[in-house]
Image: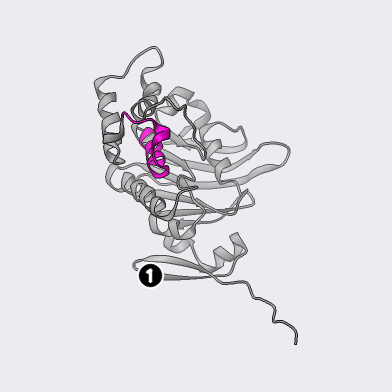
């Protein structure tokens, strides 16, 4: 569905992405992982057209991204950035309704189909009974599910999520990613999600793309891409990788400590 070929992009003179190529397969969850500053968020911004690409090509279902208009692109890709804010007066229902503007515009109004999508999105994230609540009055985990409801109600085949579990405790990290997994498995969405934790990536992603210094260091199914060798090369970290309960576990080795002198 989404093909990135030899993409180079930068915020200034020095490129952040350096000839990145990756294929994100339809109906699967792909985790983007790598050290801070390796280009994960930059790649999502390049896909959305928020950052100019100086080299390479990005295609959505065979069509060059730069040839797709902004509003048309919003009907095909939903994007959730790292940080999200809304005014105190905005309710959850109103937030989710914002997702429909790409379909009917500011001067129009939601159709019955749009309203059904809004209701279904809230049902999927388990917040149907919170529609009248102010978004900022929800718990941290509920707010993150609220933003996911908004991108889900956008009704696109492709969803890009930039660190959706950042700042959440373990319980809500698993709850949100379990929801993300179900969107792919049960609702056929193609999802690209930026994650920092390799154990979360192995638990919830079908495929993994590892970035380091703006380049792809490893890519493929999670079971094959996450190895002791790739973790050492990408994160400069020695780790034991083993299967447990049907998934991979990444256990970093503690740094060797010098023995105190006698």
Q: Position of residue 131 (x, y in %)?
A: 31, 31
What residue appears at the point 58 percent right and 72 percent down from the top-left corner?
254
Residue 128 versus residue 23 in the image, above or below? above
Above-or-below relation of 78 to 106: below
Q: Main secondary structure of the magenta part?
A: helix
Classify residue 127 as left or right of residue 29.
left
Which image quarter holds the N terminus? top left
Q: Which one is nearer the viewer's eye here, 112 or 96?
A: 96
> Crowdedness of circle 1 by 10 Å Cα count: few (<14), some, many (20+)?
few
Identify the residue under disc 1.
Answer: 244
Q: Residue most toward the front?
A: 137
Report the residue that reaches farthest toward the top: 107
Is 114 above or below relative to 28? above
Could you say whether the residue bearing mark 1 is in a helix, strand or loop? Answer: strand
Q: Is residue 190 visible?
A: yes
Q: Looking at the picture, how far across and down is residue 3, in whole percent?
A: 48, 42
Q: For residue 152, which quarter of the picture?
A: top left
Q: Quadrant of residue 103?
A: top left
Name of the residue lying farthest toward the right: 262
Residue 114 in picture, x, y percent from top left: 29, 24
Q: Is residue 69 visible?
A: no
Placement of 73 over or under 221, stated as above or below: above
Q: Specify the segment rendered in magenta.
A: 132-150
On the picture, is 96 further left or further right than 45?
A: left
Out of 84 and 65, give the one closest to the viewer: 84
Q: Please give the name of the residue rendered at 42% of the width and 55% of the height, measured from the top-left corner.
A: 170
Q: Position of residue 33 (x, y in %)?
A: 52, 53
> Which quadrant is home to the C terminus?
bottom right
Q: How many marks?
A: 1
Is 142 a magenta residue?
yes
């Amino acid at each position: 569905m989404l093909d990135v070929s030899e993409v180079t992009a930068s915020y200034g003179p020095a490129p952040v992405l350096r000839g990145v190529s990756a294929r994100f397969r339809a109906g699967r969850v792909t985790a983007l992982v790598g050290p801070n500053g390796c280009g994960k968020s930059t790649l999502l911004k390049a896909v959305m057209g928020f950052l100019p690409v100086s080299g390479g090509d990005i295609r959505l279902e065979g069509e060059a991204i730069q040839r797709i208009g902004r509003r048309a692109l919003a009907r095909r890709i939903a994007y959730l950035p790292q940080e999200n804010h809304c005014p105190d007066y905005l309710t959850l229902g109103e937030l989710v309704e914002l997702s429909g503007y790409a379909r009917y515009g500011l001067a129009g109004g939601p159709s019955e189909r749009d309203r059904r999508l809004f209701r279904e999105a809230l049902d999927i994230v388990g917040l149907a009974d919170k529609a009248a609540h102010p978004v900022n009055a929800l718990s941290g985990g509920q707010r993150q599910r609220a933003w996911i409801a908004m991108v889900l109600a956008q009704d696109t085949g492709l969803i890009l999520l930039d660190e959706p579990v950042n700042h959440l405790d373990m319980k809500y990290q698993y709850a949100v990613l379990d929801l993300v997994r179900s969107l792919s498995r049960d609702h056929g969405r193609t999802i690209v999600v930026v994650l920092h934790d390799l154990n979360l990536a192995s638990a919830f992603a079908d495929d993994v793309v590892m970035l380091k210094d703006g380049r792809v260091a490893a890519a493929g199914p999670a079971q094959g891409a996450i190895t002791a060798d790739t973790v050492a090369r990408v994160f400069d970290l020695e780790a034991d990788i083993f299967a447990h309960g049907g998934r991979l576990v990444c256990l970093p080795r503690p740094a060797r400590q010098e023995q105190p002198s006698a």
